[in-house]
């Protein structure tokens, strides 16, 4: 039996950049820790409306540095949370770097029908191990869960209030 080896950070970044510059590259993908492409379907309009609402809420509550679909380096490869937030100083540290060499302070995953609990748990844990202070998961019916290194939280440790309009779900 042959065991696959995890790629080092430089190899993952090189693979990411090669894919990003290839004209036939898929639009929505991530790389696992072995450098294998994980394809995602193009987000639906409804999904993107939720992402926009979350981005807006984070910008209002934490400051104007929330963005969507940013690639970040984790111990499980290069992942693309739906929304991330970090302060302006941290953004200045990574100006011009894609993917980000670290995980931002807040990462948000907006679930789609194709997501599995195992996949979302794996991503949330990778974000937290990579330095995220909080991971937020928005469920299919608008339910919002907050996670920290200690596990699921009853409320945001950062004081985030995320109430999304029912019309989005």
Image (cartoon, rainbow, N blue to C red):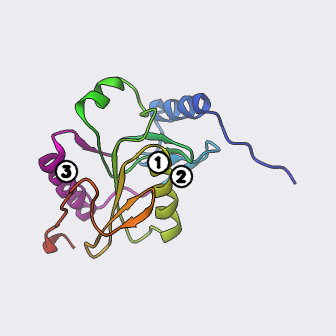
Q: Is residue 101 magenta?
A: no
Q: In this image, 46 relative to 95: left or right?
A: left
Q: Which residue is mark 1?
A: 29
Q: Position of residue 11 (x, y in %)?
A: 61, 30
Q: Residues within 10 Å of mark 2 (few under 14, many from 20)?
A: few
What is the span of residues highlighted in magenta in the rendered image?
40-68
Residue 95 makes an appearance in the image: no
Distance, label 2 to label 1, CA atoms, is 5 Å
Q: Residue at x 44, y 69 (%)?
A: 114
| Quadrant into which the C terminus falls | bottom left
Image vertical order of residue 111 relative to residue 2, above or below:
below
Compared with residue 87, is residue 28 higher up or lower down, i.e. above or below? Answer: below
Q: Which residue is mark 2?
A: 38
Q: Residues within 10 Å of mark 1 (few under 14, many from 20)?
A: many
Main secondary structure type of the part rendered in magenta: helix
Among numbered discs 2 and 3, the one appearing first in the sequence:
2
Q: Which type of secondary structure does the marked residue at label 2 adopt?
A: strand
Query: Residue 58 got which mark?
Result: 3
Determine contact: label 2, label 3, CB under 8 Å.
no
- Report the number of discs: 3
Cα separation, mark 3 vs mark 1, equals 24 Å
Nearer the observer, 10 or 126: 126
């Amino acid at each position: 039996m042959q065991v696959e080896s995890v790629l080092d950070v430089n190899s993952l970044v090189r693979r990411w950049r090669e894919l990003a510059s290839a004209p036939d590259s898929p639009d929505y993908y991530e790389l696992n820790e072995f450098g294998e492409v994980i394809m995602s379907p193009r987000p639906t309009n409804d999904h993107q409306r939720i992402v926009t609402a979350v981005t807006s809420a984070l910008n209002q509550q934490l400051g104007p540095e929330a963005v969507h679909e940013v690639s970040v380096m984790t111990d499980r490869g290069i992942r693309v949370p739906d929304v991330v937030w970090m302060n302006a100083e941290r953004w200045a540290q990574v100006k011009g770097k894609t993917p980000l060499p670290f995980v931002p302070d807040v990462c948000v995953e907006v679930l789609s029908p194709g997501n599995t609990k195992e996949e979302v748990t794996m991503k949330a844990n990778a974000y937290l191990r990579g330095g995220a202070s909080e991971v937020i998961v928005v469920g299919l019916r608008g339910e919002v869960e907050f996670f920290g290194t200690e596990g699921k939280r009853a409320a945001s440790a950062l004081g985030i209030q995320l109430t999304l309009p029912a019309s989005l779900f």
